[in-house]
Amino acid sequence: MNRVKIALRTPWFWAIVGIALLLLINTLKNPAYLAVSVNPTTGMLTGNVLDILRVSAPIIMIALGMTFVIATGGIDLSVGSMMAVGGAVAMETLSSLNGSSPIGAMLTAVGLALALAIVLGAINGFLVSVIGLQPFITTLIMMLAARGIARVITGGQNTNATNEPFRLLANGQIFGIPTSFVLAIAIVALIALAMRRTALGLMIESIGINPHASRLAGIRPRPILFGVYILSAALAAVGGLFSVSEVMTVSVGGTGNLMELDAILAVVIGGTSLAGGKFSIVGSTVGALLIATLNKTVLFLGIPAAATPAFKAIVIIVLVLLQSERVRSWALVRRKSPGTPPSGPAPTVEQTASVSKEAVA
């Protein structure tokens, strides 16, 4: 019973319930929805579930970076534009290195994309931690600036490239699972290990709870804030690489568009408070899977584009309500029957006054 209560109080438990319900709805419409088959041409596995895992990889990356930024009490509205920057650098690099070693070109493209994202993330971190600007304003400016940088890199045009190793980042498989999803989970595991096996995670949480108290405790907020914004930008660039490798095209206006909203939703659904403090890496990952499943469900059910935001909003509102302590207490607390006698005699006025005096004293 205690384990059940703990599970019900875990925010990302309800995200798992939401994923299961969405899959059930899709299965009721098409009983073969969860079926997995082998593509006779490529020999790889295909299926809706594998598609969900593949498209969830970019969301997992930006949600993971957003988790640590929000845990410090900040916000990063530039992750969608960082995805566009990473994709633009990668596509332009691969296009210019066409004809050279495919693996060398891919490594160069990935390295340059990460390098530029780290520089832009460092600017965010500097403005927030050193200059003291509000994270909302800082990252809002960077959202516009990074999107403009992506346009400059590509000349304002969609850029295509051909590179088989890079294409396999999203379209390849490892033991039947999309490569991008496997890489995303590996990155999540490595970062989770670094956060929980060292004091870094606790320091991030302490800064989000009370920066002044953490400073008095010997924690230096500036380097940590600097680092989380760099990490967020780098992970967003990785998400951009996953996104563009699926179609081998970067759209300066479409790649990463409004993805920062999906990242914030995934983090909140996973149980990380927007006020800062404790964070949940597992919760953010499950939240990203829920967002990917929801996006896939919208397309599968043929919901009109005009009604898509409303449908997503309804699902997310239901999940947030299920996470609410008050709503759960209404559902879980057993009310006593009207005929149940009180557990003891009601206190007298003199006893109540005596207790109040002792409490005041």
Image (spheres, rainbow, N blue to C red):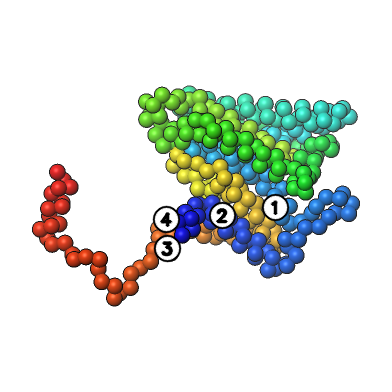
Q: Position of residue 37 (x, y in %)?
A: 81, 57
Front-lying residue, 122 or 157? 122
The residue lying at 75 percent from left, 43 percent from top is 179
Q: Is residue 308 left or right of residue 72?
A: right
Q: Earlier in the sequence, mark 3 or mark 2?
A: 2
Q: Amino acid at mark 3?
A: Leu
Label 4 belongs to which residue? 325
Mark 4 secondary-structure assignment: helix
The residue lying at 56 percent from left, 54 percent from top is 15
Q: Marks 4/3: CA distance?
A: 10 Å
The residue lying at 25 percent from left, 66 percent from top is 343
Q: Position of residue 238 (x, y in %)?
A: 68, 36
Badge 3: residue crowd in 10 Å (few <14, some 14–19, many ≥20): few
Mark 3 secondary-structure assignment: helix
Q: Marks 1/2: CA distance?
A: 15 Å
Q: Marks 4/2: CA distance?
A: 15 Å
Q: Is residue 3 left or right of residue 45?
A: left
Q: Earlier in the sequence, mark 4 or mark 2?
A: 2
Mark 1 secondary-structure assignment: helix
Label 2 belongs to which residue? 15
Q: Do the residues under discs 4 and 2 have CB atoms within 8 angstroms? A: no
Q: Is residue 319 left or right of residue 106?
A: left
Label 3 belongs to which residue? 332
Q: Marks 3/2: CA distance?
A: 19 Å
Q: Amino acid at mark 1?
A: Ile
